[in-house]
């Protein structure tokens, strides 16, 4: 819908906008109002270049798009009934819990094995563990290929499917060759379109699930869903959205907790939403409140950093990992909120 700056366009201006939209296979239909005439674009109005050309005209106030920019991830797309399942949970039918350490310590694999067993007993369905880590400081531990064997060994021992972050093509190949069923795209890479395309093309034709974190800086809803569309458009729509807090931080927290974004996402996309409270708040003591709020907001699941001995962990674990007994308690209450929320008719 084209909204002119003045009450209507003159014949020369109408000729100009008509020429633009017709070159993109659309046409113009004026809608005459009492005070202003607006111009509907009839046809597929999603072409960015057409919109940019129209928006660049000095007599145009703005273009309101009626059509969603997402062909696949949109709530009204044919994929809206697509179901994603992992660890015995179909997203949307039952609360999904992903839990485990931030970072696998290749020198002390037993912490990971013990944590894997403990999060399973606490009720987690998927085991997380960072093999390769995006670290702000180049001298900090960057992860280790050896940790991939530890991750897969823990998966064999517990029977839990695993989730780990990949940051580039080599890691992507190693993880897929090892059989990692859930790949995480971290907040720092959430808008790395060449990585999103590489992942999309590598997982096409597989059952692999992509856990897409929300970008670190307050990204718009459309930016978040479009990143998922990048992955999905190669043929595998198994993408889960993961809000994890944004910058700038709320005073006292690691980031700005953004679990309140869930109802807004649910209005626009069918993609399941799994909230990560650990990176949102950044302190173990605040994680339960953030996790339970996420479920109240309608999240389909949680991705939580947990460790049997957080103080012995590496990466984020000493600060933000919760112990398995707290995880079990969060899962217990989260399930209750989950069920109450879905039973209630009006909320
Ligand atoms: C993580 O999951 O440990 C991590 C680094 O996440 P994020 O990309 O959200 O910072
Ligand atoms: Mn972490």
Image (spheres, helix red, strand yellow):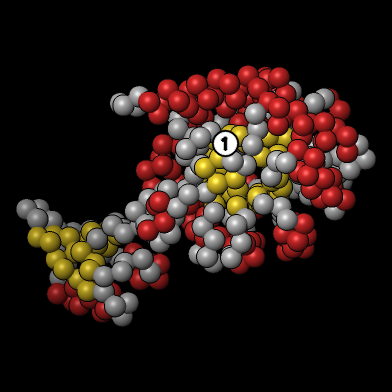
Q: Is residue 122 above or below residue 10?
A: above
Residue to which mark 1 is pinned: 96
**Residue located at (76% from left, 34% from top):** 116
**Residue located at (76% from left, 61% from top):** 177
Task: Please tell me which residue lies in front, 21 or 70.
Answer: 70
Split into 4 quadrants, where in the image is the N terminus? bottom left
* Occupied quadrant, residue 167: bottom right
**Residue located at (63% from left, 24% from top):** 287
Query: Viewed as shown, does residue 6 lie left or right of 115?
Result: left
In the rendered image, residue 277, in percent from the top left (x then y), is placed at 61, 31
Q: Is residue 75 above or below residue 341?
A: below
In the rendered image, residue 315, in percent from the top left (x then y), is placed at 80, 37
* Mark 1 beta carbon near ligand 1 (under 8 Å): no
- The local secondary structure at tag 1 comes to strand
Whether residue 265 appears in this view of the structure is: yes
Task: Please tell me which residue lies in front, 2 or 336.
Answer: 336
In the rendered image, residue 8, in percent from the top left (x then y), is placed at 14, 63
Query: Viewed as shown, does residue 212 lie left or right of 260?
Result: right
Q: Residues within 10 Å of mark 1 (few under 14, many from 20)?
A: many
Task: Please tell me which residue lies in front, 148 or 192.
Answer: 148
Query: Viewed as shown, does residue 125 lie left or right of 30?
Result: right
Q: Is residue 131 above or below residue 244?
A: below
Task: Kindly give the residue lying farthest to the right in the view shown.
Answer: 107
**Residue located at (68% from left, 29% from top):** 282
Q: How many marks?
A: 1
Whether residue 321 appears in this view of the structure is: no
In the rendered image, residue 149, in percent from the top left (x then y), is placed at 84, 50
Split into 4 quadrants, where in the image is the C terminus? top left
């Amino acid at each position: 819908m084209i909204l002119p700056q003045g009450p209507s366009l003159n014949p020369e201006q109408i000729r100009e906008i008509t020429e633009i939209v017709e070159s993109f296979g659309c046409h113009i239909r004026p809608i005459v109002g009492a005070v202003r005439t607006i111009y509907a674009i009839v046809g597929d109005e999603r072409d960015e270049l057409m919109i940019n050309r129209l928006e660049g005209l000095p007599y145009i106030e703005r273009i309101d798009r009626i059509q969603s920019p997402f062909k696949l991830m949109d709530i009204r797309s044919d994929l809206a009934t697509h179901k994603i399942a992992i660890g015995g949970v179909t997203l949307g039918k039952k609360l999904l819990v992903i839990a485990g350490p931030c970072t696998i310590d290749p020198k002390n694999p037993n912490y990971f094995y013990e944590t894997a067993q403990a999060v399973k007993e606490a009720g987690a369905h998927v085991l997380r563990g960072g093999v390769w880590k995006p670290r702000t400081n180049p001298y900090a531990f960057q992860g280790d290929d050896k940790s991939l064997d530890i991750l897969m060994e823990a998966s064999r021992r517990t029977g839990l499917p695993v989730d780990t972050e990949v940051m580039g093509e080599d890691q992507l190949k190693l993880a897929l060759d090892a059989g990692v069923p859930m790949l995480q795209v971290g907040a720092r890479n959430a808008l790395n379109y060449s990585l999103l395309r590489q992942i999309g093309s590598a997982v096409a034709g597989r059952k692999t699930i992509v856990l897409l974190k929300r970008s670190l800086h307050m990204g718009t809803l459309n930016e978040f869903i479009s990143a998922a569309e990048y992955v999905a458009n190669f043929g595998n729509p198994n993408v889960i959205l993961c809000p994890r807090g944004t910058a700038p931080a709320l005073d006292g927290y690691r980031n700005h907790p953004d679990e309140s974004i869930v109802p807004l996402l649910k209005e626009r996309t069918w993609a399941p939403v799994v909230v990560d409270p650990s990176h949102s708040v950044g302190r173990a003591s605040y994680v339960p409140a953030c996790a339970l709020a996420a479920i109240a907001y309608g999240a389909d699941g949680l991705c939580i950093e947990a460790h049997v001995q957080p103080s012995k962990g590496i990466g984020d674990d000493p600060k933000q990992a919760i112990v398995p007994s707290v995880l079990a308690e969060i899962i217990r209450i989260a399930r209750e909120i989950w069920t109450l929320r879905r039973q209630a008719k009006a909320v």
